[in-house]
Image (cartoon, rainbow, N blue to C red):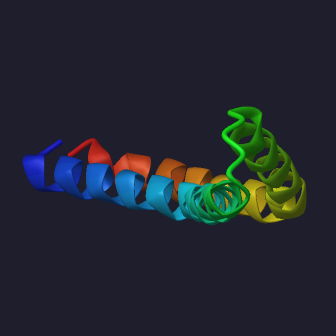
Amino acid sequence: MNPEIAIDLFKTTVMFALYIVAPFLITVMVVGLLSSLLQSVTSLQEPTLTFAPKLIALAGLALVLTPWLLRSISEFTITIINRMPGLAH
């Protein structure tokens, strides 16, 4: 395997990982911002008020995105497996 192919494979994998993780990161960021804003407005400084909504939002998002995640990961895996014979050069 020459370095160009290895770099391309690594770049593809990292970009795919970011593509898969982005909805979760954005959700946690938005929920965290809203809960922090709520805590600032109400002067409640309870740590569970930031953790619980994030956990609930992530669980709900995981349930909603499961079909998309499975389809995307299986398509990526099939693509990488199909590229393997070309990597042996």
Q: Work out which quarter of the rendered image holds the N terminus and state it.
A: top left
- Give x and y (percent) for residue 28: 63, 55
Q: Residue 41 sits in which quadrant?
A: bottom right
The answer to whether residue 45 is above or below residue 15 is: above
In this view, the residue in front, 70 or 88, is 70
User: Could you tell whether 76 is left or right of 41 in the image?
Assistant: left
Q: Residue 50 sits in which quadrant?
A: top right
The answer to whether residue 3 is above or below residue 33 is: above
- Give x and y (percent) for residue 65: 81, 62
The answer to whether residue 66 is above or below residue 89 is: below
> In this view, which residue lies farthest toward the top?
47
Q: Residue at x 56, y 56 (%)?
A: 25
Q: Residue at x 85, y 47 (%)?
A: 56
In this view, the residue in front, 87 or 17, is 17
User: Could you tell whether 14 is left or right of 65 in the image?
Assistant: left
User: Could you tell whether 89 is left or right of 64 in the image?
Assistant: left
